[in-house]
Image (spheres, rainbow, N blue to C red):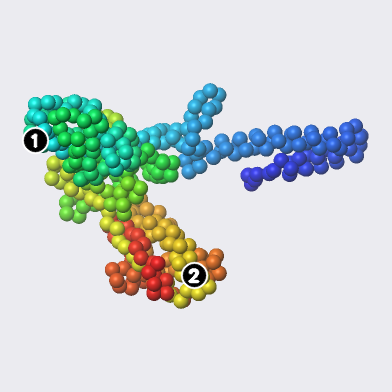
Amino acid sequence: MAFENKSIKEIRDLLFTGVSLEYNNRIRIFPKSFIKILCTVFAGVFVFLYKQIGWVFLQLFPETAFWGEVQVLGVKIRPLVKWGVLIGVGEPNKGTQWQGKISVNVTALGNPLLSGTQLKSPLTGKIYIVDDTAPLENETEIINVTCAEIGQAGSLAVGDTLNFVSPLGFVSKEAEVAEIIQDAINPETEPDYRFRVVNRWRMQPQGGAPADYRIWASEVPGVLNTYPYHDTETASGVLLFISGNPNIYPDRIPSGELLRQVGDACTYDPNRGGGAYRKPMGATIDPQGDGSYYNIRPVSVISFDIQITGLSGASPSEFAEAVRSPLEEYFLGREPYIRGLSDDNNKTNLVSRNNASSVIDQIAISRKAEFDSVTLIKNGSITPSYTLGMGELCKLRNLYINGVLQ
């Protein structure tokens, strides 16, 4: 039986027709207006229960479970987060604070810079706190500071300046960022968390299989996806290519610090202490043995250009605005094929002119426009298709319409 939503009016009409046929033709006790009101009340009750049952049904699946908080019989619950906890993903990442090192010019030696001393950035407007009390014994001291707020709004780059909130007589008012210790990450959003939960639901741990490395790496805030391979240079080596969340890392290229965090997550279970409880004992992801995790590498992103010729029936600039987003989504959705992880019925490792043309054709139909041809260009050369290799992703770089860059 199809689960179809019916309006109150439809249910009321069904009830009214049934009641009229059953009773009014035999005994006319109630006026039709009363029966219609009674049927409307019952229809409202039926619709309310129907929608409640439908909502509960959606909570059975991670893809449709509710993200927000609901209260049932006095118990507060977030259905999607409950699913994440039950299958081992845990709660959504709360985000991280920016941490870095600043270079402080000391004007009077021998005075300590106390922990909790506040600095403010003229760039972000955020407050930064000195982590530990530091004796100022040199003319230039390197001090660790942490942003007081969670999220990317507090991110600074090397060379940015901070000013002490309260002027101190023994240091210069202005300090410069010398090094970044930890990137700032916003609290995890609903789409990112749902993506992790659904992936974990589909990939069950198997004791060191490729899916396990993807699961372990996904626990690190800022990781978008992981592509595991066998290292052909060693018998037991594992190569991991990591893509970063594009909201944090431009072009999905992660930082070295994120790669090291992934290495730790794939080696040690943070919930069980310092033992190597995760990857198999013989597997190698840190060949040099110094925590650098040489075998964990960033993905490479290949840029493609699209050239559309013979466009008619629409302004090139307006058509470019309409087609750019779907094309970008197409390229961002391509990824390498890994047997056992990728969907064999829907491989997305092929970037082709035909696929791009079909995307453009859909936009052209909706806009009643026409075009002659679509050309896929890689590194200045025309190519009909390209198969993404080990650790390769792709993106749209330039869009040309009728020979003009849009």
Taking 323 as reference, is 176 left or right? left
The residue identified by callout 1 is: 139
The residue identified by callout 2 is: 315
The percent position of residue 146, horizontal first and vertical second, equals 25, 34
Q: Nearer the viewer, residue 404 or 162?
A: 162
Mark 2 residue element: loop
Where's the N terminus, which quadrant?
Answer: top right
Q: Residue at x 20, y 38 (%)?
A: 174
Taking 395 as reference, is 62 left or right? right
Question: Which badge, 1 or 2, is on the more N-terminal residue?
Answer: 1
Amino acid type of the residue tagged 1 in the rendering: Glu
Q: Residue at x 74, y 43 (%)?
A: 9
Q: How many marks?
A: 2
In the image, residue 277 above or below residue 336 = above
Q: Nearer the viewer, residue 319 or 211?
A: 319
Residue 32, can we see it?
yes
Q: Residue at x 13, y 42 (%)?
A: 289
Q: Which mark is residue 198?
A: none
Amino acid type of the residue tagged 2 in the rendering: Ser
The percent position of residue 305, horizontal first and vertical second, equals 35, 67
The percent position of residue 274, horizontal first and vertical second, equals 21, 31
> Is the C-beta separation of discs 1 and 2 under 8 Å?
no
Mark 1 residue element: loop
Circle 2 residues within 10 Å: few <14, some 14–19, many ≥20: few
Taking 201 as reference, is 115 left or right? left
Q: Disc 1 versus disc 2: distance between alpha carbons? A: 63 Å
In the image, residue 311 above or below residue 24 = below
Residue at the extreme top: 74
Taking 340 as reference, is 255 left or right? left
Q: Quadrant of residue 406?
A: bottom left
Circle 1 residues within 10 Å: few <14, some 14–19, many ≥20: few
